[in-house]
Amino acid sequence: MEALDADAIRAAMPSPPISGGAAADRIASALGTPNVISEKANVAAFVVRRFVDRGLLVDLSANPDGALHHPDQVAEVCRREDLADLVAADTPLGPEQAAARLRVRRADFDHMVRLGWVRSPQSIKVRFGTSPTGAVDVALYITASVDAVIPAHPEVD
């Protein structure tokens, strides 16, 4: 720790890091569809995490519950010509949405998951009613991986 040069770190990053939610807000604004408080987000932190997985952004945090990102790196991503396509490919789908996108029954989609044709990179807790005991984990799927099922398995009707 003593070998770290605080001045060099401040020079490399003159403004403080931003959260994944703030990065998602900046990306949404760059697309012309800003996230509005108390409404469903147009770009969610889920997409930002997928951008980290793709190597487009770096997570500066060691905190598993929340990422921090360099604001200049986020600004660079926001200037990409293919930003809308990247966000569309990394948009999360719940299992019902994924089944509907593939035009299959939910049970058939569940079989595709069991076969490993599509994988969930993340799940979220969803509460039904007001009881915390009513919370269940719901898997989220990436749009691009759901869309890749049909070309990868043309033998399936």
Image (cartoon, grey):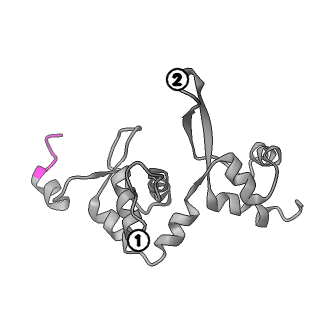
Picture quadrant where residue 56 is located: bottom left
**Residue flagged by tag 2: what amino acid is it?**
Pro
Judging depth in this view, the residue of 101 and 131 nearest the camera is: 131
Q: Name which residue lies at 57% across and 28% down.
A: 129
Residue 114 - label: none
For numbered disc 2, what is the local secondary structure?
A: helix
Q: Position of residue 120 (x, y in %)?
A: 63, 46
Q: Which residue does the numbered mark 2 point to in the structure image?
A: 132
Image coords of residue 34 (percent x, y): 39, 63
Image-based side of 140 in relation to 67, left or right: right
- Residue 117, given in percent of the width and then of the height, sits at 75, 52
Residue visible at 12% across and 50% down in the picture: 6
Find the magenta span and give its range: 1-6
Q: Main secondary structure of the magenta part?
A: loop
Using the numbered discs, state the Cα–Cα distance from disc 1 to disc 2 in whole angstroms: 36 Å
Counting residues from the start of the chain, the first of labels 1 and 2 encountered is 1
- 93 lies above or below 81: above
What amino acid does circle 1 point to?
Gly
| Crowd around label 1: few <14 · some 14–19 · many ≥20 (10 Å) | few
The percent position of residue 81, horizontal first and vertical second, equals 45, 78
Query: For residue 32, which numbered disc appears in the image?
Result: 1
Please identify the quadrant where the C terminus is shown. Answer: bottom right
The residue that appears at 41% across and 75% down in the rendered structure is 80
